[in-house]
Amino acid sequence: MASTPIIEKPVPTPARPPVARKFNSPFSWLSRATTGTDKKPASPPATSPPPHDRRNTTSTVGSNSELMLSKLDEGDEPGSATKSRHSQSSLKDRFKIVRMREEAGISAFDEGSVPEATNGGVFGNFMGRSASVASPTSPSIAEKDESFAPTMKHSASSPGPSPITRKPTINPNLPPGTVSGMSTAPDADAEVDWDLWQAVVNEGPAAVARSSPEQLNRAIAGGIPQAIRGVIWQVLAMSKNEDLEAIYPQLVARGSDKPNINGNTADGNSSSNRSSKGKESLASSASSIHSDNSTPPMADGATSPSLETLAVTSRLAALKARPDPTSEQLAKLHKLEKAIKRDLGTRTSYSKYIMAAGLQDGLYGVCKAYALYDEEVGYAQGMNFIVMPLLFNMPEEEAFCMLVRIMYQYGLRQMFIQDMPGLHLHLYQFSRLLEDLEPALYCHLHRRGVSPNLYATQWFLTLFAYRFPLQLVLRIYDLILSEGLEGAILKFGIVLMQKNRETLLGMKDMSALTNFLKDRLFDVYIDKAPSASSILDSGFFGSALNGVDREVYRADMLVQDACSVKITPEMLASYAAEWEEQQRAESQRQNELQILKSQCTSLQSQVRRLEEAAEQSDTEHVQVASELVRIKVENEELQDQNESLKGQVEELKNVVAHQTEEVEARLRAEMDAVMQRNIEVHNLNRAVEEEKQEMERALVDTKLRLAQINSEYEAIKQKWASITQMLNS
Amino acid sequence: MSDGATPLPKPSSSVKLVLLGEAAVGKAPNMTQSSLVMRFVNNDFQDNKEPTIGAAFLTQKCTLPTRTIKFEIWDTAGQERFASLAPMYYRNAQAALVVYDITKPASLIKAQHWVAELQRQASPGIVIALVGNKLDLVASAGSDGEEVEGEDARGVPAAQARSYAEEEGLLFFETSAKTGERVAEVFTAIAGAIPETQLKGPRGGQRVEERRVE
């Protein structure tokens, strides 16, 4: 970084000396005392700053320095002296550097570098180049330097006699983003309470929450200074875990043929982690130290940090012991990589920020590493949106730890596991809250068929990062990490509905309502007359590419409004219980329905069988009946026949009775006739016989006569012969 | 949609339509189901829009000879993980468009699951259309795609999908969101298939009343 021209922002404010200061200047560390006194006057706006001039230079001026700083550990050459620290103290150190730098009011860029920045090159460089930042971080130096602070304070950070005049002076004509402004906006009148933040870092959020809860709440509600946001987030979530960080490059590299593709970061990480292995146990104990004091976010997980640590270590062991992936696993891995890559680039949130272009590898890495780390959840669309705001504030391996922490400890995981029970629960809670707090609006939407399911799903699954402006989302993350996921997202959801109540009530059409709920809900927080400082804030991540999203939002108001929404854990718990009850009832109903359905089908089949049987017997009955009819008819016929036959028989009997006499008479007559005839024939016969005897006698006579004749004939013949002989002779 | 010459405004009613189908996994910048809708709504094809979380909402009017139908389209996220959200969107829907990729047989199986779920859980009488998208990738096939299939990228024969659709009583189309081929046809057919009686349901009727009151 020493090579980068470090020039104070050319601020017209005369009192501000254009001092160029090196980052490692030991003098810029400010003492607790100084800030304390500085804060007490409460800085009444003597010079009436513009309404939304919400910041003094100490917090606004600055750079992406914390991003660089967060690279310190990883970027340093192996063996550097800074390595032997455990994670908690590294966050502390980082915080100190930032505080030092912030209070000194040094900007990382001068405006001269801005044109390059908009070309997108510088950001990329600067992400990678941070390795060269020296390490002024050893705590001892910082402590010693406290004595210098008062003097430095004056020259460096207070440009004039009155602190209020230190409003950031920017050319308001510049579009947001062309200036390297800082952070999303602590309040105008609230100076950054470095002591408080330092206490948070050093003692842990739980301790601070106990000792000065109001201050902490106010500070968080006012916005964590952008410069230390990444550090504070990690402290709040207690997410730093070097075991996880160590495994991260392995997870990212898994499945790639050349593991050294990611060599730059991977090697750096592993070396730095290797050197800090000895302190790993401290990291986990550091997180468990605070586990007994339940800060709000830990309310749900208060008892489990050590359990979680155990889970993490066992998971890590499992990951390390993993054999080489089989081809099937490789194919799966390949599919996963493709799915993640599909959602990179312009398909993710905030791609319009120049800085986002340099974070795509990180986004890919965190998504892939998480998917491999938690195979039950894997990668689901929505995660990519959640990771992006993290990456804007911390290096990728820390973002990974953070994601793991948010998933497991804050309950985000419940929204992403199969069937998404967490999401359904939160949607129900939201719906019930809306019903209770805004009954008119609830009814209005309900009547038009616009249920929370339809619009709030996107909010909850992406922690509002899907459509909402980054300025607001970072503040939402602040609250989520400090208050817990459930309460924060519900509060923001409700407050947005409340703020838009009148507009929504005025809309009658479902599609208008739906589109408004999706895209325009946060417009109520557009700052119509943005102050210079808020312009600065909005431009922190580089200008939006197409000039879109130039709006400046009143993030403070949003957060204040959200905090003022009264949602108590008891309410949420009761809704959750209601939901569970409903779910149980629902599943019971489902079961019952299932049973009834199966019963119904069996009964139906029974009915069908019975119907068939009935039908069959019906047809049989019909057959029988018709048979009967037929038989009856037949019967009658037969009876008739019978009658007639009887008559006939009678007649015949009559006939028969008469006939015998007749026959006898006739027979007798005939017999008589025959007898007569017989006698006649007999007589005739006798006459014939007599005739015959007579004829026989005649015959005998004839024959006698014949013989006489014959003998006469012979005698004649002899006489004839004797004559002839006598004649001849 | 173009014959604005009718003297009397046709009766108009709104139809809730839900779009289901597997995520276009793996295909480089190519069309997802939602592109089908983008094509229909804007007559436009966006190659690379942000992934849908939950569901995206769109509306489009469709003019039939006898009436005008306003589609309220819920385009659901395609990723498997979001399947449990789908019932929120197909509840009360009068029509559903189940999309698959004609180059990927697995996507038809997923589509068949959706059809089964709709038939089981959605309101009875829902009009379901099965749409095989990416017809442009099987360019050699004719517009019907039946005779000339085989050697190219096609993975699902049109005849197979059509016979399945006929079995289940679904409308069936093959489209290309990229070229716009037959996209409008799908929606016109759905509009035509919704029974007149359904359109006079509480939602449509309520709307008319409201307008009169105003």
Image (tube, coloured by chain):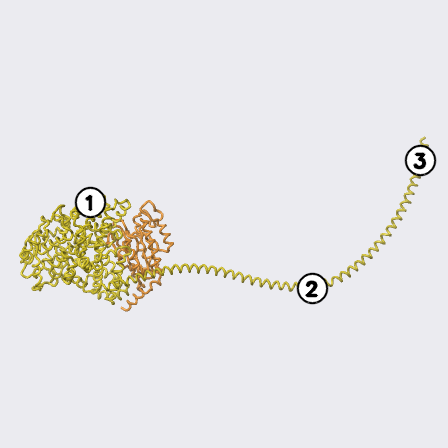
Q: Quadrant of residue A177?
A: bottom left
Contact, CB < 8 Å: mark 1 with mark 3? no
Residue under the point 40% across and 59% down: A601
The chain whose colour is yellow is: A
Disc 1 packing (10 Å; few <14; some 14–19; many ≥20): few
Disc 3 packing (10 Å; few <14; some 14–19; many ≥20): few
Q: Nearer the viewer, mark 3 or mark 2?
A: 2
Q: Position of residue A702 (x, y in %)?
A: 90, 44
* Distance CA(mark 1)–CA(mark 3): 185 Å
Q: Nearer the viewer, residue A526 or A428?
A: A428
Specify which label sits upstream in the sequence, 3 or 2: 2
Q: Position of residue B104 (x, y in %)?
A: 31, 49
Disc 2 packing (10 Å; few <14; some 14–19; many ≥20): few
Amino acid type, label 2: Glu
- Which quarter of the rendered picture does the C terminus of chain A lie within? top right
Amino acid type, label 3: Gln
Q: Report the disc number at residue B211.
A: none
The residue indicated by pointer 2 is: A651
The residue indicated by pointer 3 is: A718
Specify which label sits upstream in the sequence, 1 or 2: 1
Helix, strand, or loop for circle 1?
helix
Q: Nearer the viewer, residue A186 or B137?
A: A186
Q: Position of residue A604 (x, y in %)?
A: 42, 60
Q: Nearer the viewer, residue A303 or B208?
A: A303
Chain B palette colour? orange
Q: Note whether B116 is above or below A703 in the view shown.
A: below
Q: Report the disc number at residue A261.
A: 1
Furthest toward the bottom, the residue is B213
Q: Is residue B39 visible?
A: no
